[in-house]
Amino acid sequence: MRSEAYRRLVASLPCMACGVPGLSQCAHANTGKGMGLKVCDLESFPLCSDRPGTPGCHSLFDQGALLSKAARRAIEPAWIADTQRRITALGLWPAGIQQPEEGAAHVR
C-alpha cells in the first residue's frame, strides 16, 4: 500500500528514536525490503532527517549505525504499532486506508 497522505502524517510526528519534533521523515522498516524496493507505507515510522553537521536518525538507521540488525528487527514492529496508534489517537487516520486491528499492526 502506498499513500502520500499516510507518509505525510508519519513525517509530522516526532522522531521515534530521539524524540526531536519538526524534523521527521517517513522511514520504512528495513526488514522485508529488497534492493530498490520499499515495504508497505503502513510499515513506517518517523525518524529525524540530517541537519548541517549532524546525521539524523533516519540516515543512521538505514546505514545500520543506530541499532544492530537484531535490535532493528526487534524494534521495528513496536515503532510501527506506536506510529499507527498515535495517528489513530489524533483522529487523523486517512480516509480510504483500512486501519489495522488493535494489537495487530500491519507488519510482515
Image: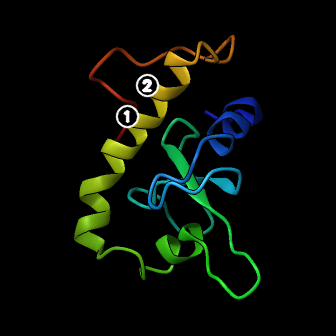
Contact check, label 2 and label 1, Cβ < 8 Å: yes
Q: Which part of the image, by quadrant, shows the N terminus?
A: top right
The residue furthest bottom is: 53
- Give the quarter of the image for residue 6: top right
For mark 1, does the 10 Å Cα neighbourhood hold few (<14), some (14 to 19), or many (20 or more) residues?
Answer: many
Please say which color scheme the image uses.
rainbow
Q: Amino acid at mark 2?
A: Arg
Q: Which part of the image, by quadrant, shows the C terminus?
A: top left
According to the image, label 2 marks what residue? 85
Residue 49 seen by the camera = yes
Please tell me whether residue 101 is drawn above or below residue 73 in the rendered image.
above
Q: Residue at x 47, y 52 (%)?
A: 16
Q: Residue at x 22, y 69 (%)?
A: 70
Viewed as shown, does residue 86 lie left or right of 53? left
Residue 99: percent from the left, percent from the top? Answer: 49, 16
For residue 33, the mark is none
Q: Amino acid at mark 1?
A: Ala
Residue 68: percent from the left, percent from the top? Answer: 29, 76
Viewed as shown, does residue 36 lie left or right of 104? right
According to the image, label 1 marks what residue? 81
- Give the quarter of the image for residue 65: bottom left
Residue 33 vs residue 59, the one in the foreground? 59
Please tell me whether residue 49 is drawn above or below residue 8 in the rendered image.
below
- Give the quarter of the image for residue 49: bottom right
Residue 33: percent from the left, percent from the top? Answer: 48, 59
Viewed as shown, does residue 10 lie left or right of 4? left
Residue 35 vs residue 60, the one in the foreground? 60
For mark 2, does the 10 Å Cα neighbourhood hold few (<14), some (14 to 19), or many (20 or more) residues?
Answer: some
Residue 84: percent from the left, percent from the top? Answer: 47, 29
Residue 62 vs residue 46, the one in the foreground? 46
